[in-house]
Image (tube, rainbow, N blue to C red):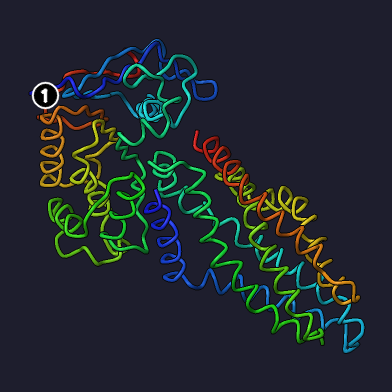
Amino acid sequence: MLAALRCVIHRDLLLAARRSSDVMTVLLFFVIVVSLFPLGIGPDPALLRTIAPGVIWVAALLASMLALQRMFASDHSDGTLEQMLLGATPLGMTVAAKVFAHWLVSGLPLVLISPVLALQFDFPQELLGVLTLSLALGTPVLSLIGAIGAALTLGLRGGGALLSLLVLPLYVPVLIIGAGSAEAAAAGIGGQPQLLLLGALLVFAGAFAPWAVAAALRISAE
Amino acid sequence: MEKTGIPSLEAIDLHCARGERRLFSALNFTLRGGELLRIGGPNGSGKTSLLRIACALLEPTRGEVRWAGENVRRLQEEFWRQLVYIGHASAIKDDLTSAENLRVACTLAGIPVQPARIGEALRELGLGGCENLPTRVLSQGQRRRVALARLALSEAMPLWILDEPFAALDAGAVERVQNLIAEHLARGAAVVLTTHLETRIATTLRIDLGGS
């Protein structure tokens, strides 16, 4: 079973590497959206410092949304998904491997580049750690929740818009807690409670979302 | 050949309706090891739906499919571990090479394979020299062969379900795939397939959908 999971992750990373434009699109979208705010709002360091966590979090959320549709679409259209449904490995495990690979190529780059982007906002350097950690814990939750939406809207016409409507409300708690952690740290009261909550969300989503995705995929295959 | 080791695939009172259309009703069959079931019928008569029901991908409107006396929708992985399904879509990724595609397909199905066997299987289907080419540059028929090369590595799977295995293949490849199927039947395994082609393999059971 582990061989199958390794194989799925390896395959998805290989596909992403051979089609790197998809990965770059998401990353560039994130960089550009975040950079638009200092340009639009003007050079007011106090204001920029205040909005930095919120802006970076909203941009990360939109960027991860952008990547969602691709999560199962190509496997669905070329029949690989059928083979996964009929695989020897429980579907929930296969899905977990796929979501993990998806996060590695669409979530992890955002986490890694966010400290650089935060500098545009004159964000205090000692708080960069909290911001990055909150994204590192939060973006996998976004991928896991998003996978449920992606599976439910698979094969629908105009699925993209429906997917956003379905998934964005579910992202709200992650956004509030995630952006709240850096804000709380900036206010000097420490972001640990929010980070712990994000960690709890990640564990919860990691344990249950793959099975919800698996059920949704079975329905969409009928 | 001793055929008692292979469980049988039974369809009991199967009904299938897609939307308003009734595709087939009250369908019964029992397929034992070493037997070939060939499903015929015009386009849109429900051949693929029947195969998908047999794989437990699709829920029948009524009735059930049993493997070794158990409903396949309850057996799930236990059934799928013994099944090779090659569907209408070949499950081939354009950006992967033939060898990578085949390795992924086998690993997903839970068939452990050595890299050497992968090259052998591809050569058996006449794809020698294409192992390291991305499937994007292959023709439709060659891509189909990559998907079918999995059969050469699936001797141990007691049930093959093949949707139009001969579509897009040339005469030589049709011959090779027929050989693989005939050898598999001789091993005592069961095969279900749909095709419009006249095959030379002895068909044990035949179901014609639509109009019959």
The amino acid sitting under disc 1 is Ala
Q: Is residue A164 left or right of residue A45?
A: left
Quarter residue B28 falls in:
top left
Residue in the picture at 26% in, 57% down:
B139
x and y percent of residue A125 in the render?
A: 77, 86
How packed is label 1: few (under 14 Cα within 10 Å), some, or many (20 or more)?
few
x and y percent of residue B181 in the render?
A: 16, 35
In the depicted structure, whether residue B85 falls above or below residue B41: below
x and y percent of residue A196 in the render?
A: 75, 61
Residue in the picture at 27% in, 18% down:
B207
x and y percent of residue B110 in the render?
A: 32, 45
Q: Nearer the viewer, residue A194 or B21?
A: A194
Q: Is residue B156 left or right of residue B43?
A: left
Q: Nearer the viewer, residue A22 or B3?
A: B3
In the depicted structure, whether residue A141 falls above or below residue B42: below
Quarter residue A50 falls in:
bottom right
Name the residue that disc number 1 marks.
Answer: B202
Residue in the picture at 61% in, 47% down:
A207
Q: Is residue A155 left or right of residue B178?
A: right
In the depicted structure, whether residue B207 falls above or below residue A2: above
**Image mark 1: chain:** B
